[in-house]
Structure formats: structure tokens, C-alpha cells
Amino acid sequence: MNSPNYHLEELAIARDPRAPRHIVPTNVPEGGRVLDIGCGAGQTLIALDRGSQSTAVGIDVDVAALLLGQTLTDEVRFACARAEALPFSHDSFDFVIARLALPYADISRAVTEIERVLRGEGMCWLVLHPVSHAVRQLLWHLRRLELKGAIYQLYVIANGVGLHLFGRQFRFPLRRNRIESFQTSRGIHRALRGAGLVDVMIRRGRFFVVMARKPSPGSAVTTRARSSEANPVMARGAERTTVGGADPS
Ligand SMILES: C[S@@+](CC[C@H](N)C(=O)[O-])C[C@H]1O[C@@H](n2cnc3c(N)ncnc32)[C@H](O)[C@@H]1O
């Protein structure tokens, strides 16, 4: 659980394009229906230039953050829900954001839910944790001789390796309600393709940003995506990787 200060600081960062840690999606369709998974107090949605006709919905497991969000804006609808079980109908959103939330979720279940709630041609925009994040956290705990924190980070690293190699994650054995991992390009690409999303674009720079599209039902791309799952060579070839820099209706 993050403190209210965390969410307010992130709101200030989201509103300041010159802030070093500023990262918000720039291609949100004007007037579209936008869902932010793990929205905290809605900081990203509040800072986004969405156009006056758009509908913004934020979900999070942290009730305190959602209540804080309600004091900050009346232009976002907040709901308490998990990424792995979104309380929305199929094809409800044009754009789904998950900024630094999927590292704390069961990724394959969460991306299956993202694909389900996106309409055909809708896009998702994710910010993930690279392995360097987990290693930094591990060293931080080790320097302070914090054994519990270090053990937890070793779990996060093992989980990231499992996601990379086998597409599998496991819950923290000492606290079964927790699941966390780092992500790799290969791991997230496989999870998104497995959920039926296409045109996966990965940008690894200061931030690990991933975008993907839900094909229209019956489109040639849908058929191609499905058949490529049975053919790992085609699936790899389809990757476009750039290295660089509440119910809405
Ligand atoms: C690092 S914060 C990011 C908050 C916000 N998206 C931002 O970028 O400032 C991660 C958020 O994800 C939420 N979260 C963690 N696990 C979640 C899950 N399984 N489903 C939904 N939200 C989750 C946390 O409560 C927290 O608000």
C-alpha cells in the first residue's frame, strides 16, 4: 500500500512534463473510454489531456488511495477491484493504462482481462519493472541488513525469471495474498500475444513501456495472431521491439 504522499507526488510528476520521472501515455484517443488499472488516486488520469467528452475509470485494490482520488477530481470514476478480475463488460474501453501496477499482479490473468475489456482496435499502454528495479531493491535491503525485505526481493527475482522462462508466476509463499515480479520483453510479449493482443511495441529506455492492440473481431490480424501462437517462429517475427530512449457506459 502506498502513502497518500506517494500518490500526490506522482500527481505532481504526471502534471510536469519536465520532471525526470514523468511518463504518461501520449496517444489516448480523444473522447474515448479510458481505464487505468492500479490507478492509485487517479494521478495519471487526472494529468492526462483526454478531451472533454472522454470517460475515465480508475480501479485499484487500495481503498484509501481511491478515497483520496475522489477528493482530487470528480472527472474520474473510481472502483475498488483487482487487475485479475475487472468488473466491466467485454469491449468496454478504447484505451487501458496500467502504469507500474502489473508488476504487483498475476500478469497472464491481468492481460487476459485487459484484452477482454478492450474494444476491437483498442490499445493498452503498460509501464513495467525491469530486472534492474528488483536488483536495486535487493541491494537496498541487503545494505540495511533487512533480511525479510531481501528474502522478498529474491522471491520477486525468482518470479521474474519464471515469467521470462516459462510464462509462470507464483505467490509469495510466506504471504499468499502477494504476487510480484520483474518483467522482461520476452515474458510480456508472450503474455500479451497469449491473451490475443497484437502489434506489441516495447520501448526500453529510462522506462520499460509496452503497447499492444486488440484486433477487431474476425480481422485478418486476429486470425494471423491466433495461428501464430501455434507457430513460435511467426510469433517472434511479429514482434516490433524498439530499443531506446466502474462500468463506463
Ligand atoms: C506503484 S503504484 C502505481 C500507481 C499509479 N498507477 C502511478 O503510476 O502512480 C501501484 C498501484 O497498483 C495497485 N495494485 C497493486 N496490485 C494490484 C492489483 N492486483 N490490482 C489492481 N491494483 C493493484 C496498488 O494499490 C498501487 O496503487
Image (tube, rainbow, N blue to C red):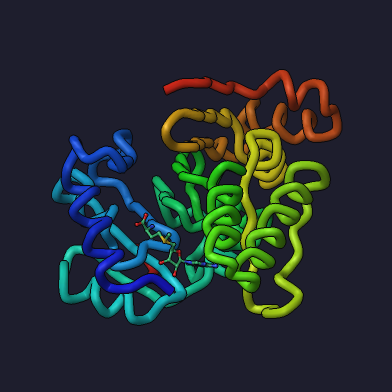
Q: Is residue 246 above or below residue 163?
A: below
Q: Work out which residue is located at the far right of the displayed protein and give it.
A: 230
Vertical arrangement, residue 112 with respect to residue 66, above or below = above
Residue 86 percent across, percent down from the top left: 52, 67
Image quadrant for the N terminus? bottom left
Say left or right for 39 vs 210: left
Hey, which quadrant is residue 233 in on the image? top right
**Residue 248 location in percent, x, y?**
35, 63
Depth order, front residue of 192/243: 243
Horizontal side, residue 153 vs residue 35: left or right: right
Q: Quadrant of ligand 1?
A: bottom left
Q: Which residue is at 41% across, 52% downward?
A: 93
Q: Quadrant of residue 67?
A: bottom left
Q: Is residue 55 visible?
A: no
Give residue 166's position: percent from left, percent from top.
82, 46
Left or right of 123: which side holds 23? left
On the image, the x and y values in percent for residue 106 come to: 65, 61
Residue 184 visible: yes
Identify the residue at image location x=70%, y=59%.
Answer: 154
Asked which quadrant contains residue 36, the reply is bottom left
